[in-house]
Image (cartoon, rainbow, N blue to C red):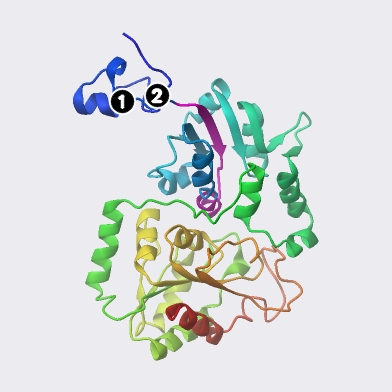
């Protein structure tokens, strides 16, 4: 029996989708799609970084239309990538992915992350061309090319980080020798998650009046000072109620349960609790259903960018310049504050950079987006 191993649909250990559908055999299948390049992308975490890195995929597919793209990631990011039409195969780091990395040869290996586990994986993989970062023989991170070296230097020099004007997307496109042309991150939502959001809106009678505004101003546990204060959220909710007729949705993850409860206790006449224990898919579907999202620099931001939502993003200790909003949002930060973009996990300055962003500023930004 003739087998065309270089077809993108050939699975090796089970029948392909077209054989299952019609019984057609490999030798005379008209669905044959030849693979010319095998590309491995290594991007493990965090989830927000994984999602924004998917903006590489349209550019890669444009340059290599017959490429077979494998993506190695952590299990936590699987829901963000599982329906991605540009990814032919997802490799989960916690499963048996290392076997593929160690035994398979790739034409191109891309690792845009300068963390040691990712760099070690890039070094261990077999690839004719490697882009981004690897480890050298002394277990030192080695940037490959000008753009990777630029990113590496920013990571170890605060002044370079603060002076940077390039977005993350521009930098990683430079790493892989492609031109960034505003390609969005890629996120495809499941129909059952979309149904959940539609039912949630119907149950709470949301959307009869526009705009529907989502508030996601936490930031998980790692970056304590990326959070916008609880009091500011409460005041913003009151101002939004005064300026807009629709209800807002308060969003968050497990780390926001306590703070969101405090916000809701004084904002229930405007805010509806979106929940803090949703799956990634349901969380993204709620973001997809709002008209404008107010958020900090976190996963919700990158979901909104992937879904072409209007965004007001609040910045303090992290770089506003690195965030690409695709001409669809407004960045707010305490301008003139010298310690901005410090990347510190905590801070003793009072008021700090996030406290200096006023609810009135946020309302004005929302108004601009409503009328844009």
Name the spot of residue 124 as percent of width and height, x first. Answer: 64, 27
Residue at the disc numbered 1: 16
- Label 2: which secondary element: loop
Q: Residue at x 63, y 58 (%)?
A: 167
What percent of the width, then of the height, locates residue 123? 66, 30
Q: What percent of the width, then of the height, locates residue 327?
A: 53, 67
Residue at x 74% of width, y 60% of height: 161
For residue 236, side relative to residue 188 (left or right):
right
Answer above or below: position of 165 versus 266: above
In the image, taking residue 146 as reference, residue 195 lies left or right, namely left
Start and end of the magenta stretch?
35-52
Q: Residue at x 76, y 37 (%)?
A: 140
Q: CA distance from mark 1 to mark 2?
A: 10 Å
The residue that appears at 53% across and 84% down in the rendered structure is 359
Q: Could you tell me if residue 94 is visible in this image?
A: no
Q: Which residue is mark 2?
A: 7
**Disc 1 or disc 2, which is closer to the eye?**
2
In this view, 358 is above or below 33: below
Q: Earlier in the sequence, mark 1 or mark 2?
A: 2
Residue 311 in view in this figure? yes
Residue 203 figure quarter: bottom left
């Amino acid at each position: 029996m003739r087998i065309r191993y270089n077809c993108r649909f050939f699975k090796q250990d089970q029948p392909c989708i077209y054989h299952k559908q019609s019984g057609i055999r490999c030798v005379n299948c008209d669905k044959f799609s030849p693979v010319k390049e095998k590309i491995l992308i290594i991007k493990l975490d965090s989830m927000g970084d994984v999602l924004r890195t998917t903006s590489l995929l349209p550019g890669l597919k444009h340059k290599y239309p017959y490429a077979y793209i494998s993506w190695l990631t952590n299990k936590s990011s699987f829901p963000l990538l599982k329906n991605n039409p540009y990814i032919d195969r997802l490799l989960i780091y916690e499963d048996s992915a290392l076997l593929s990395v160690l035994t398979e040869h790739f034409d191109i290996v891309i690792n845009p992350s300068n963390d040691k586990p990712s760099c070690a994986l890039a070094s261990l993989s077999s690839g004719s061309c490697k882009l981004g970062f690897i480890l050298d023989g002394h277990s030192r991170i080695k940037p490959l090319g000008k753009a990777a070296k630029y990113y590496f230097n920013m990571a170890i020099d605060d002044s370079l980080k603060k002076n940077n004007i390039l977005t993350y997307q521009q930098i990683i496109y430079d790493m892989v020798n492609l031109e960034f042309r505003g390609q969005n991150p890629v996120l495809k939502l499941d129909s059952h998650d979309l149904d959940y959001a539609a039912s949630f809106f119907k149950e709470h009678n949301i959307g009869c009046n526009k705009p529907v505004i989502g508030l996601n101003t936490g930031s998980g546990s790692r970056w304590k000072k990326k959070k916008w204060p609880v009091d500011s959220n409460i005041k913003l909710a009151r101002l939004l109620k005064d300026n807009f007729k629709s209800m807002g949705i308060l969003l968050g993850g497990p780390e926001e349960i306590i703070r969101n409860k405090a916000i809701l206790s004084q904002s229930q006449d405007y805010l509806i609790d979106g929940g803090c224990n949703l799956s990634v898919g349901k969380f993204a579907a709620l973001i997809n259903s709002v008209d404008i999202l107010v958020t900090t620099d976190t996963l919700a931001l990158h979901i909104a960018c992937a879904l072409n939502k209007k965004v007001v993003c609040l910045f303090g200790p992290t770089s506003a310049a690195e965030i690409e909003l695709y001409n669809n949002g407004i960045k707010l930060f305490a301008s003139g504050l010298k310690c901005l973009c410090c990347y510190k996990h905590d801070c003793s300055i009072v008021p700090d950079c996030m406290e200096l962003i006023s609810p009135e500023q946020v309302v004005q930004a929302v108004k601009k987006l409503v009328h844009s």
